[in-house]
Amino acid sequence: MTASPARLVVMLYDRAIQSLNEAIKAIDDGDIERRWKANKNASEIITHLAMTLNFDEGGQIALNLNDLYRFMLTTLVNVDVRNDPQPARDVIKLIEPLRASWDQLAKGADSGKLAAKPTAKPVGQAGKAVGPADNAAPPRPGIAISA
């Protein structure tokens, strides 16, 4: 059985959150090597998510996600540099709503229909309306991500 593209994104977010929680626990345990490995794994997942963004179909959403992923990666450097769990906690708080949105989209795809319709379609290049692409997060009313 294969997972839908949306379900794969959810799985990546889950693994990133799991790795960040492992880094936090490793800091609490004083295990520097385990912290580094867990933080590196989370950073690699976020890098992969950024590298697979579809800017042609994702429009502004993909651009916003790219900025957010870059911010996450910059923030996660401080986990290792400062041996500080707070940046990992901060990134988890950023990932969780993205994960929830993708999970809703994946559930809709799994059932053969969209789980929820966005109230407005984002506008892509040349004013063409675009919907959530395989590699861009679905819009969430009331939430804007800006650089």
Image (cartoon, grey):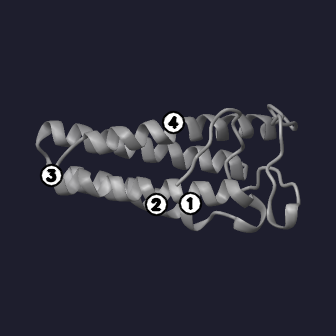
Splitting the image into 4 quarters, where does residue 18 fall? top left
Asked whether, in this view, residue 138 is left or right of residue 143, the answer is: right
Separation of disc 1 and disc 2 at Cα? 6 Å
Which residue shows up at 27% across the image and 45% down it?
23
Describe the element under mark 3 as helix, strand or loop. Answer: helix
Contact, CB < 8 Å: mark 1 with mark 2? yes
Which residue shows up at 81% across the image and 36% down it?
118
Asked whether, in this view, residue 23 is left or right of residue 4, the answer is: left
Q: Give the foreground label among 4 and 1.
A: 1
Splitting the image into 4 quarters, where does residue 36 fall? bottom left
Contact, CB < 8 Å: mark 3 with mark 4? no
Which residue shows up at 30% across the image and 44% down it?
87
Describe the element under mark 2 as helix, strand or loop. Answer: helix
Separation of disc 1 and disc 3 at Cα? 29 Å
Badge 4 is on which residue? Answer: 96
The answer to whether residue 141 is seen in the rendering is yes
Badge 2 is on which residue? Answer: 70
The answer to whether residue 135 is seen in the rendering is no
Residue 105's disc number: none
Asked whether, in this view, residue 47 is left or right of residue 21, the answer is: right
